[in-house]
Amino acid sequence: MNIIAVVPARMGSSRFPGKPLADIHGVPMVGHVALRTAMCGSLTATYIATCDEEIMRYAASAGIKAVMTADTHTRCTDRTAEALLKIEKELGLTADIVVMVQGDEPMVTPGMIEAAVAPMLADPGIPVVNLSADMADTGEFEDPSEVKVVTDLKGNALYFSREPVPSRKKGAATVPMRKQVCVIPFRRNFLISFNAMPESPLEIIESVDMLRILENGGTVRMVHITERTLSVDTPEDLKRVRELMDKDKLRPVYS
C-alpha cells in the first residue's frame, strides 16, 4: 500500500501572507507540518507542494522533499492533485492513498495521520476521510476561520460551515462544537476525479472544498480525535500555537 502525504503551502495567503515560513520555536510552520507528518510509519513518503521558491529553498535546507506546482491554484486540493502526479513520476510508483495535510496545521501528529487513514484501510469503499476535533470554547466556535462540521449518526459529514453549526440559539444547554481538522486522505483516483469536477455553489459560498463532494451526492467520512490542535489563519492564531507548542512532546525530536 503506497500512502503519500502532501503538504500544500503558499506564501500568498490572503489572511496571513507568508505564514508557511512563520517561526514557531525556531522552525518554520510548514517545517513543523512536514516533519511531524513524516513521523507516521504508514507513509511511503512526505512532500511539500508549493509555488514559491522561498519554500522550496527552505525544504532543501531542511532535507524535506518538495515539488514545485503552478501558481494558479486556488484550492489546496488542486495543488495536491498536481503534486501527486509529479511525486508518482519522481518515485516511480502509483499511490493508493494521498493524505493532504494543510500547511497551517503545525500541531499535527503521527497518530492523527494513522487515525485518518484507518477507515480507508478497513473499508475500500470509503473514498475520502476528514478529521474533526472539539473546539475549546464558544469564541473558537464563532470564529469564521474555523470550519465547523456536523455529522449523521453513521459519522458521515452532513455539512461544513464557517458559521456556528448546530445553532446555539434555540435554548440548548450544550451543542456539539466540532471543527474540521485538515488532515484529509483521498483515494488516489478519487482525488483526480474530484479535482476535475467544477466548484459547486455551496463550496464557493463557504470556501470549503469538501462541500463539492456533498453537493454531488458523495460522502465524507469523519473521524473524531481528542488531540488538541489549532490551525493558523491569523497572526493571533500563531501566538496561540506558539504557546500551545511550548512544551510539545514531539518538537524536541526534530527541532
Image (cartoon, rainbow, N blue to C red):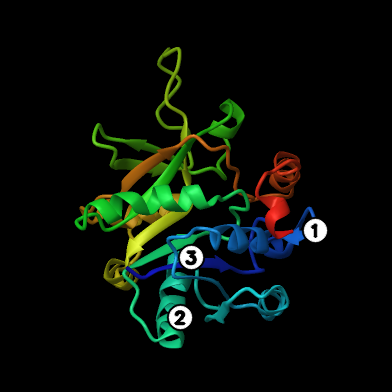
Q: Is residue 105 above or below residue 28?
A: above
Kindly identify which numbered label has been placed on residue 12.
none
Instruction: Tell me the quadrant of the picture where the N terminus can be found.
Output: bottom left
Q: Amino acid at mark 2?
A: Ile
Q: Which residue is mark 2?
A: 87
Q: Residues within 10 Å of mark 3 (few under 14, many from 20)?
A: many
Label 2 SS:
helix
Q: Position of residue 194 (x, y in %)?
A: 31, 67
Q: Earlier in the sequence, mark 3 or mark 1?
A: 1
Give the numbered dot on residue 26: 1
Element class at badge 1? loop
Q: How far apart in space, not on screen, are marks 2 and 3 (Cα)?
A: 16 Å
Q: Is residue 57 left or right of residue 150?
A: right
From this viewpoint, is residue 202 visible?
no
Tag 2 or tag 1, which sits nearer the N-term?
1
**Residue bearing the label numbered 3:** 76
The CA span between labels 1 and 2 is 28 Å
